[in-house]
Amino acid sequence: MNYYHKYQAEFMEYDAMAQDFIDDDRIWAQLHKAASPSKAAVREVLAKAERKIRLDPEEMAILIQNQDQETINEMYVLANKVKREIYGDRLVFFAPLYISNKCANNCRYCGFRRENKKVVRRTLTMEEIADEVKTMISEGQKRTVLVYGESPETNIDFICDSVRQVYKAKWGNGEIRRANINCAPLSREELAQLKEVGIGTFQVFQETYHHQTYQEMHPAGTIKSHYRWRLYAQDRAMDVGLDDVAIGVLFGLYDWRFELMGLLYHTIHLEEKYNGVGPHTISFPRIEPAIGTPFTAQPKYAVSDEEFKKIVAILRLAVPYAGLILTAREKPEVRREVIPLGVSQIDAGSRIGVGGYRQSTGNMLPDKEQFQLGDTRSLDQVVYETCMMGNIPSFCTACYRAGRTGEDFMAVAKSSFVHNFCIPNAILTLKEYLLDFASEETKKVGEKAIEQYVDQMADPKRKSFLRQALVRMEEGERDIRL
């Protein structure tokens, strides 16, 4: 079957729908109605958010449209409080692995688009994937997201084989324990194959929820031009039991206020359809420059740093139990400001050029990259800074391997989950990192952080378990988890 027509029957199914769950006019009407909200209206929404209840679109619109600095500052304080109550002080670490930059699509903003002649195209072989993974492991990585272009070379069989290869690779005491997937939307049959190989989160970003902008960014005649095929990608995953899904947009393609509302409507759609289970994570990357891609130089809807801070805080309050992912697209100084506003996951030590882990130590392969990184520091440097900032780095994958996903995750997330599982597992995985990979300086601040968090633990049984587990790890045992 011709690659461009492999999903044609399913495209027609979505095209036949009278409407989807994103109503552009309704979103703008809600935003206009919320223009210049009073302090009292803002504080009423913040009071609901403090109870960790997912906001309604009309309530999110009030926070979006608020221009009063006093209540914006109150929002920032509350976002930090809600994040700490749900996720504690832990910050989960991962790194992306770009498998291929070959792509049949022609997205105006993407360095991988097929008409970009300045990109050197590559798809890693299985042997090269193993080598890349071993390099990542040797630096201390335990979690990754595998990134693929949309190409006949990276079909579902190739993706499944690559996932197996990632899990098979070992280096010393290290291994990748969780591989998430960022790839093109797939059919239910293909998604069932992904479930069989044991992926973590299935991640598809809508890029922009605005219908007209979506069509302008994704030319007709490409698979990605089908808005609803992409919009319902998470539905198909949930339908086959892949209950750990992620959503996101690329901020800068359209008005950030509209895109935030789109993320909330997507969350509500999933929660209403799948028994309260929404996205496990939400990503909010901003457009960054890409070689041979003029659109990225001066995007019309570029998001300022101040607007970016609002985006993160509003997301934390609007969708309190979703993980918020801040990527290394952002410069270190931006990350320092934004992390306290609700971020629960970051990547560090990332190389986004295809083959980049073996070939470079930073953003050094522009002709093989989708965009430019803002934070090219090593994993060790970011772990060190995280400990110094009073957070605890975590490489934990326990929930996924214990089956705490979907409804099960939501049930425990709304209890004392963070104190019973997240913080202890963060401590144990940080200890692994310190023993096997850290520099001497990072070991010192990391051990101090571990001692501080163990001392603060209220549950005597948890504290005793941790102290014994830390001794066992000093003696050579690994992968101890709750």
Image: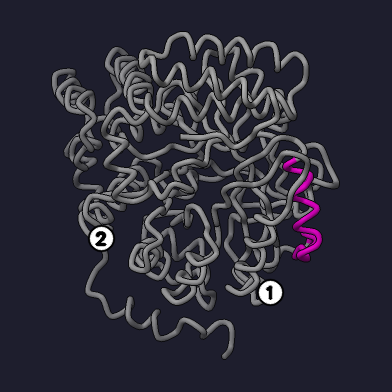
Instruction: Determine if the magenta segment contains residue 135.
Output: yes
Q: Which residue is mark 1?
A: 153
Residue sitting nearer the eye, 43 or 280: 280
The amino acid type, in three-letter code, at marker 1 is Glu
Residue 57 placement, left or right of 347: left
Counting labels gives: 2
| Colour scheme employed for the rendering of this structure | one colour
Give the residue drawn at x 31%, y 49%.
278
Using the rendered image of the protein, determine whether residue 113 is visible from the camera's viewpoint.
yes
* Mark 1 Cα-neighbour bin, 10 Å: few <14, some 14–19, many ≥20: some
Residue 453 placement, left or right of 121: left
Give the residue drawn at x 41%, y 61%.
242
User: Marks 2 and 1, how far apart in space?
Assistant: 33 Å
181 versus 60 height, above or below: below
Q: Quadrant of residue 136?
A: top right
Residue stretch rendered in magenta on the structure: 118-137
Mark 2 vs mark 1, foreground winner is: 1
Residue sitting nearer the eye, 382 or 242: 242
Image quarter hosting the N terminus? bottom right
Secondary element at tag 1: helix
Residue 469 placement, left or right of 49: right
Measured as percent of width and height from the top left, residue 79 is found at 34, 23
Give the residue drawn at x 43%, y 58%.
213
Q: Main secondary structure of the magenta part?
A: helix
Toward the bottom, the furthest residue is 1
Q: Quadrant of residue 419?
A: top left
* Mark 2 Cα-neighbour bin, 10 Å: few <14, some 14–19, many ≥20: few
Q: Quadrant of residue 94?
A: top right
* Mark carried by residue 21: 2
Q: Earlier in the sequence, mark 2 or mark 1?
A: 2
Give the residue drawn at x 72%, y 33%.
376
